Amino acid sequence: DAGVTQSPTHLIKTRGQQVTLRCSPKSGHDTVSWYQQALGQGPQFIFQYYEEEERQRGNFPDRFSGHQFPNYSSELNVNALLLGDSALYLCASSLGIGLGTGELFFGEGSRLTVL
Amino acid sequence: LAKTTQPISMDSYEGQEVNITCSHNNIATNDYITWYQQFPSQGPRFIIQGYKTKVTNEVASLFIPADRKSSTLSLPRVSLSDTAVYYCLVVLSGTYKYIFGTGTRLKVLA
């Protein structure tokens, strides 16, 4: 049973560029959430997708956008990259948004470096 | 919005019990409290979750007092492999936003 998989694992971009990160949820899970984790900090909630719609959003600008596909996989897009966007981006999957529990299954993350 | 705070770091010796407390002063009535373990360059891993009183599983216990303004993760008989960062997570019921704590860096010494 495959867990949460993310790609790419590492990438380097320059300021102003755009990036797309991908996530496949754990088998059987239908909800995906994304987090930004700066070095030495805790994960910060970006947004959550369920039934192909963004359901909740944290305090992140519109430069951060996402998508969920019919197979429950998800993408995180960041436009007009800033140096401060350098971080580990984590994807987590869970079952059923209506449950409201915190049992999340995380991927290993995508390490983004913005130069 | 709920805010969670934790001690920055803790040291312990192998075989000891470790208790890590998270403060969440303005937690809402229906918020769940969850704890995660994270090793360097890995995603967080679920440890335990509770709503009130005490919950125990094969690896940890979670104590939540009646006022629910804090919670304590208890790790019995830690080993070197328990060296990691531990986060509490509050899930805001109704909005289902996930608020992670500041994290506690636990170092287990031989």
Image (cartoon, coloured by chain):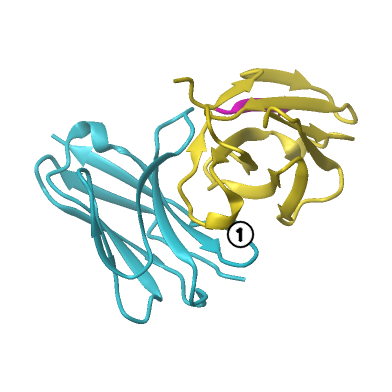
Chain colours: A yellow, B cyan
Q: Secondary structure at mark 1?
A: loop
**Residue A25 occupies which quadrant of the picture?**
top right
Q: Main secondary structure of the magenta part?
A: strand
Q: Residue at x 69, y 45 (%)?
A: A50
**Can residue A41 be seen at all in this image of the molecule?**
yes
- In the image: residue A15, left or right of residue B40: right
Q: Residue at x 48, y 27 (%)?
A: B41
Residue occupying the far left of the picture: B15
Viewer-proximal residue among B55 and B42: B55
Q: Which residues are magenta?
A: A109-113
In x, y percent, where is residue A66?
79, 38
Residue A112: in magenta span: yes
Few, some or many residues within 10 Å of mark 1 (<14, 14–19, 20+): many
- In the image: residue B29, left or right of residue A44: left
Viewer-proximal residue among A93 and B64: A93
The C terminus of chain B sits in image quarter: top left
Kind of residue at disc 1:
Tyr
Viewer-proximal residue among A11 and A22: A22
Q: Residue at x 17, y 42 (%)?
A: B78
Residue B67: in magenta span: no
**Residue B107 occupies which quadrant of the picture?**
top left
Q: Residue at x 86, y 48 (%)?
A: A62
Which residue is tagged 1?
Answer: B96
The N terminus of chain B sits in image quarter: bottom right
In x, y percent, where is residue B24?
46, 70
In x, y percent, where is residue A51?
72, 43
* Chain identity of mark 1: B
**Residue B39 occupies which quadrant of the picture?**
top left
- Up-down relation of residue B58 to residue B22 (above or below): above
**Can residue A115 be seen at all in this image of the molecule?**
no
- In the image: residue A12, left or right of residue B67: right
In x, y percent, where is residue B105?
36, 46
